[in-house]
Image (spheres, rainbow, N blue to C red):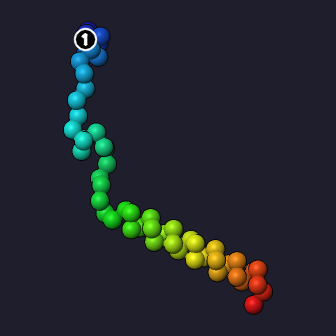
Amino acid sequence: MSDVAGALAQPVSLSTNKARGGVTGHHVRYVLAFGLLGIIIAFVAIGFYFGVGF
């Protein structure tokens, strides 16, 4: 059997990229910004359509 207590006593040290666990980039902030802007425009359009009664 292995010594589990000894293995847990060692501190874990990971680099930032390995600790992140995912891929960064791909212009995520732009996708989120355009998606949020699209939702806002859609709600405004729906509000005008049903609220004003064109």
Residue at image coords 64%, 81%: 45
Judging depth in this view, the residue of 29 and 20 nearest the camera is 29
Residue at image coords 25%, 26%: 12
Q: In which quarter of the image is the C terminus?
A: bottom right
Question: Exactly how many numbered labels are in the figure?
Answer: 1
Left or right: residue 6 compared with residue 50: left
Left or right: residue 51 compared with residue 41: right
Q: Mark 1 points at which residue?
A: 6
| Residue 14 location (% of width, % of height) | 23, 34
Q: Is 51 placed above or below 3 here? A: below
| Residue 15 location (% of width, % of height) | 21, 38
Left or right: residue 32 compared with residue 27: right
| Residue 44 location (% of width, % of height) | 64, 77
Q: Is 26 placed above or below 6 here? A: below
Name the residue type under label 1.
Gly
Q: In which quarter of the image is the N terminus?
A: top left
Element type at marker 1? helix
In the image as oriented, which residue stretches furthest toward the bottom? 54
| Residue 28 location (% of width, % of height) | 37, 62
